[in-house]
Amino acid sequence: GECYRHRASVPREAPFGAHFQKTKKKRSMTPTLQLALYVSCLRAELLGAVVIPHGDFAYDPSLVGGKNGSSELHKASMNVGQWVMSLEPDVIVMSTPHGMELTKDFLVYQNAQLSGCAVVGEDLHNASHPTYKVCRNMTTDKSTASEILDALDGEKDPGARLKATGILGFADGSPLPVGWGEVAE
């Protein structure tokens, strides 16, 4: 859609670069990058976009003795985090396939508070290795979440519609539960 085509750019020096899929016919944006570029339709400037891998070994390479590139992956992920923080963003929009999901739509969390834990070491499926929890409490910028929903619904550019649904749990009286996808990625 026109809304993001002319306004957003991903700097070449961004860690891991922009995330594009190669098809036989042409290069096309992945849904994650497309979602990130929709943010440019809002009252915001897109400062950067990154795609990082996940997994217990990426979070804690000691789980696999630092083997198979886990230490390098962890270090690269930490560098990406430092790069993102160096941009001094007001809001970080995260997309993950490992959180709550809908069968066809993007799901936008609308609760003011999110809270939950990831169990690190569980991915290894190795009962002899101890697991541990990493817990996080997070806040949501509710007005940005609403603006993202409006933009994805085509309110600002009817030709740029993606299916999206917001979730507001417990009448926003309690934190929305989150897990591995939001906590440790």
Image (tube, helix red, strand yellow):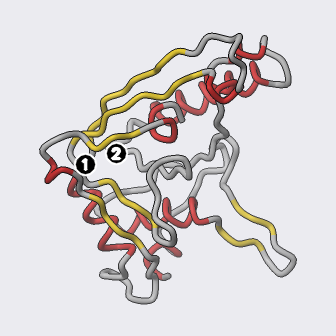
Q: Amino acid at mark 1?
A: Asp
Counting from the top left corner in percent of width and height, residue 2 is at 47, 82
In the image, 70 versus 18, the foreground residue is 70
Which mark is drawn over residue 91? 2
Q: Residue at x 35, y 69 (%)?
A: 165
Counting from the top left corner in percent of width and height, residue 12 is at 67, 50
Q: Residues within 10 Å of mark 2 (few under 14, many from 20)?
A: few
Sequence-first tag of 1 and 2 = 2
Look at the numbered discs 1 and 2 and tell me whether their residues touch, using CB distance below 8 Å.
yes
In the image, 51 versus 59, the foreground residue is 59
Quarter of the image with the C terminus in it: top right
Q: Residue at x 80, y 67 (%)?
A: 22
Q: Is residue 80 above or below residue 99?
A: above
Which mark is drawn over residue 141? 1
Counting from the top left corner in percent of width and height, residue 180 is at 50, 36
Q: Is residue 108 left or right of residue 132?
A: left
Q: For the residues marked 1 and 2, what is the alpha-carbon distance in whole angstroms?
A: 7 Å
Q: Quadrant of residue 173?
A: top left
Q: Residues within 10 Å of mark 1 (few under 14, many from 20)?
A: some
Q: Is residue 178 left or right of residue 111?
A: right
In the image, 8 versus 58, the foreground residue is 58
Counting from the top left corner in percent of width and height, residue 103 is at 51, 68
Q: Is residue 147 above or below residue 153?
A: above
Q: Residue at x 59, y 25 (%)?
A: 78
